[in-house]
Amino acid sequence: MSNLKDFIGGGSIVWWDEKYENKLEITTSQDWTVPDNVSEVTVGICGGGGAGADNYNNTGGGGGSKMTYHTLEVTPGETITISIGAGGVFGSGDGGATSFGVYVSADGGKGGATSESYGGEGGNGAPSGGMFDAGDFGTMPQPLIVEKVIGGAVFAKQIFSPAHKYGAGGCGGGWDYPGVGGCKDNPPTGYGSGSGGYSGDDGRPGICVIWY
């Protein structure tokens, strides 16, 4: 199973915090050894958020990276290399990809545009960054819609950037790990969120969460 909706389709379940006994939140690249007696994990990953592009009147906010979920069969004692995607460097840099060994990966968000247009599209279905225009206020990025399952029922919420001044960054992350895109007066927060244009901020790095 490769995504949330596929996982939901398997029957009435609860969120993974209730399904599994353990959870790891990994924010730096490292190796992870599968514990004894563990043969299945669910992994949530998102890449780093893209950075805004400082081009004054032609500034686009960077895109963010949305978290995706994957249920995987693993081998007890197996060592898995986890790479966490860095946030893009301000000036239109793309966010880096996050990967869980050779099993799954999540692209980072694209960097902001250097012309008067929307910022690069976010990774894994996250929204693009907003567009700058004259008068300090541009077009908002679309909100990021994230989902959670409790007892087989699907709940959804939206994550918004705080403002659209100078091209806001795209949002990222997931339900319990939201990434809020930045703008000129607000740096991006959380995981996988894009920075605003004309802000001087980098995108935010990704995360890998393991339930087992």
Image (cartoon, rainbow, N blue to C red):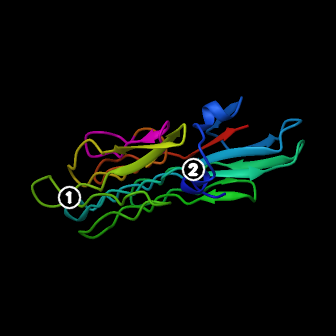
The region drawn magenta spans: 174-188
**N-term-proximal mark, 1 vs 2:** 2
Classed neighbour count for the residue bearing mark 2: other residues with Cα under 10 Å, few (<14), some (14–19), many (≥20)? many
Q: Quadrant of the C terminus?
A: top right
**Is residue 118 at all visible to an observer of this figure?**
yes
- Amino acid, disc 2: Ile
Q: Residue at x 61, y 48 (%)?
A: 11
Residue 14: x and y, percent? 58, 37
Q: Quadrant of the N terminus?
A: bottom right
Tell whether position 179 is magenta. yes
Which numbered tag is attached to residue 35?
none
Q: Identify the element where label 2 is drawn.
A: helix
Residue 72: x and y, percent? 74, 52
Using residue 23 as the reference point, say whether residue 198 is left or right of it: left
Residue 33: x and y, percent? 83, 40
Q: Which residue is mark 1?
A: 139
Q: Which residue is mark 2?
A: 8
Residue in the foreground of this view, choosing between 77 and 190: 77
Q: Residue furthest left?
A: 135
